[in-house]
């Protein structure tokens, strides 16, 4: 059950150093988000990502069922 698609693309992935710097950032200067040009683009990216994850979940469930069926048949 391997996750290939990230659903958190809107949020930047901070490093340890930037995380440590946020402790002293009282005014939110280090807050950074991945942005889209338009709201339609952001929505389209989010919906596409959601459906990819649904597809992965279905694939994982099918694979798990097949693995369990193979164990019972053996």
Image (tube, helix red, strand yellow):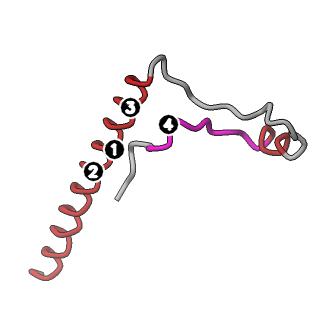
- Specify the label residue 33 is tagged with: none
Assess whether mark 3 and mark 1 are in contact (beta carbons under 8 angstroms).
no
Residue that carries the numbered disc 1 in the rendered image: 50
Where is residue 36 shown, x and y percent of the image?
49, 22
Q: Secondary structure at mark 4?
A: loop
Secondary structure found at label 1: helix
Marks 2 and 1 close (CB-CB < 8 Å): yes
Residue 23 rendering spot, x and y as whole percentages: 86, 47
Q: Which type of secondary structure does the marked residue at label 3 adopt?
A: helix
Image side of residue 16 versus residue 49, left or right: right
Per the image, the residue denoted by label 2 is 54
> Alpha-carbon neighbours of circle 1 within 10 Å: few (<14), some, or many (≥20)?
some
Instruction: Decide which of tag 2 and tag 4 comes sooner along the chain.
Output: 4
Residue 57, compared with residue 51, is above or below; it is: below
State how far apart marks 3 and 4 are (Cα). Answer: 12 Å
Q: Is residue 38 above or below residue 55?
A: above
Question: Which mark, by number, is residue 9?
Answer: 4
The answer to if 32 sits in the magenta stretch is no
Q: Which residue is nearer to you in this view: 59 or 54? A: 54
- Which residue: 32% across, 48% down? 53
Q: Position of residue 65 (x, y in %)?
A: 18, 70
Q: CA distance from mark 2 to mark 4?
A: 16 Å
Mark in front: 3 vs 4? 3
Q: Residue 17 falls in which quadrant of the image?
A: top right
| Structural distance between the alpha carbons of marks 1 and 4 | 11 Å
Residue where numbered disc 3 is placed: 43
């Amino acid at each position: 059950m391997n996750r290939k698609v990230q659903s958190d693309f809107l949020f930047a992935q901070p490093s340890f150093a930037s995380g440590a710097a946020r402790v002293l950032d009282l005014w939110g200067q280090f807050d950074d988000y991945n942005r889209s040009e338009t709201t339609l683009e952001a929505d389209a990216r989010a919906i596409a990502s959601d459906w990819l994850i649904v597809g992965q979940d279905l694939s994982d469930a099918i694979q798990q069922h097949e693995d369990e069926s193979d164990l019972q048949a053996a």
